[in-house]
């Protein structure tokens, strides 16, 4: 889902103009109404900007036509939704992004959080509960401001959201404990969890990622630079524990469905791995604002996407969770989404929250960070 620079996009357009190809997308299309032609022109620009593979095919190719149909439908959805947003009926906007050429059914097939029949939740050493007095818990928090969150990453077409969610929490816990931010390897989890057999298609759970690090690699994980991401599940674990770092000894669950507990866990423990219901086209096409979608499910078996809760606060009078996604910084608010908070656990964000534990006490570092 990489977006080329404006210069690169311009060069691509110039190259197409200088050396036209019979099998390349063009804005010239017959048999369309004026409205359809505008949509087609937007679609061609979109295919070039987002470097879609089908941009080299001719206009009438069945793949192109299928993507155009999905894109047109999503344009209509975006327009209809944003008109209601402008009237104050919604608190968030939709927009074109790298997923805008997928039908909602195609999009949902890419979501990779899959709760197993025997969930790794049962192996957590403890369950974090909300303090009796929440007055000491900050009203807002953003771990990005404290240097313990890596830049937004891109899982590509592999259903590895669970690995990115787990790694985001591992990175935060390590940075809080050690004072150094490292980018850890999602590919290690994709290749090594449950033998790495087709984990891109079958998905996984964040708990399994924590357990892989704790039980099979001595509480350590490799850096991304040493074990880079390929967006493929190869069924072969190539972890080299001599290059790995960390001292993760366990992980904790957060009281299921308790948003106060999740708030306190974020503020005092670090970035939280959370699972959500991201199945709606409104999540697929989210652009900006506080995402509030009452149709979201919140049951344990209804969640389909792993993300990382890095903070919380209020925006225009609406409480939100600050959530880091793994669909590149071209999606949402530069890769983030503000999700409704204190709305009956909307989208299940507090249903399956957890965080890794370092053997070195992190409390002192948290207190130190609060003083900065």
Image (spheres, helix red, strand yellow):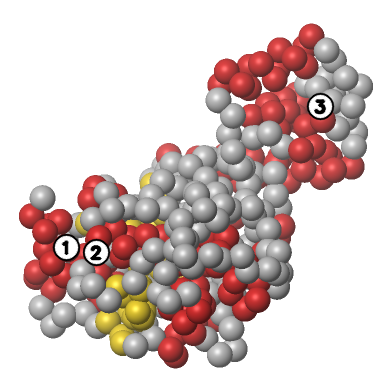
Determine if residue 115 is in view. yes
- Residue drawn at the location 50% of the way across and 79% of the way down: 216
SS class of the residue under badge 1? helix
Real-space Cα separation, disc 3 to disc 1, in angstroms: 54 Å
Residue that carries the numbered disc 1 in the rendered image: 365
Q: Position of residue 286 (x, y in %)?
A: 50, 48
- Residue drawn at the location 68% of the way across and 64% of the way down: 233
Q: Position of residue 124 (x, y in %)?
A: 39, 86
- Residue drawn at the location 56% of the way across and 66% of the way down: 239
Image vertical order of residue 229 relative to residue 121, above or below: above
| Label 3 vs label 2, nearer the camera | 2
Front one among 236 and 344: 236
Label 1 neighbourhood size at 10 Å, few (<14), some (14-19), many (20+)?
A: some
Real-space Cα separation, disc 3 to disc 2, in angstroms: 52 Å
Image vertical order of residue 78 relative to residue 196, above or below: above
Q: Position of residue 254 (x, y in %)?
A: 33, 79
Q: Return the disc, 3 or 1, that comes first in the chain's sequence.
A: 3
């Amino acid at each position: 889902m990489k977006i080329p620079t404006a210069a690169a996009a311009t060069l691509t357009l110039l190259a197409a103009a200088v050396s036209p190809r019979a099998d390349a997308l063009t804005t010239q299309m017959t048999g369309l109404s004026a409205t359809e032609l505008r949509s087609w022109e937007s679609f061609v620009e979109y295919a070039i900007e987002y470097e879609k593979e089908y941009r080299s095919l001719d206009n009438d190719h069945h793949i192109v036509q299928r993507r155009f149909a999905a894109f047109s439908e999503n344009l209509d959805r975006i327009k209809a939704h944003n008109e209601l947003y402008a009237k104050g009926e919604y608190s968030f906007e939709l927009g074109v992004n790298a997923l805008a050429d997928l039908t909602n059914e195609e999009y949902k097939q890419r979501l990779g959080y899959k709760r197993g029949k025997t969930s790794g939740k049962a192996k957590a050493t403890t369950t974090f509960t909300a303090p009796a007095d929440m007055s000491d818990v900050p009203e807002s928090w953003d771990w990005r401001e404290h240097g313990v969150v890596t830049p937004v990453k891109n899982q590509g077409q592999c259903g590895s959201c669970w690995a990115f969610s787990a790694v985001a929490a591992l990175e935060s816990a390590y940075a809080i404990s050690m004072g150094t931010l490292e980018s850890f390897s999602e590919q290690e989890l994709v290749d090594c969890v449950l033998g790495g057999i087709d984990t891109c298609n079958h998905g996984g759970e964040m708990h399994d990622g924590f357990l892989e690090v704790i039980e099979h690699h001595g509480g350590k994980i490799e850096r991304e630079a040493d074990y880079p991401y390929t967006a493929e599940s190869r069924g072969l674990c190539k972890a080299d524990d001599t290059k790995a770092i960390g001292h993760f000894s366990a992980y904790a669950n957060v009281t299921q469905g308790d948003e106060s507990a999740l708030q306190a866990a974020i503020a005092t423990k670090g970035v939280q791995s959370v699972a959500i219901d991201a199945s709606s086209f409104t999540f697929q096409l989210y652009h900006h604002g506080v995402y509030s979608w009452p149709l979201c499910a919140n049951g344990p078996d209804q969640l389909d996407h792993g993300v990382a809760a890095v903070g919380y606060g209020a925006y225009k009078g609406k409480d939100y969770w600050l959530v880091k996604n793994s669909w590149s910084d071209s999606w949402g608010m530069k890769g983030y989404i503000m999700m409704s908070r204190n709305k009956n656990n909307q989208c299940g964000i507090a249903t399956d929250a957890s965080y890794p534990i370092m053997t070195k006490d992190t409390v002192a570092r948290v207190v130190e960070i609060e003083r900065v």
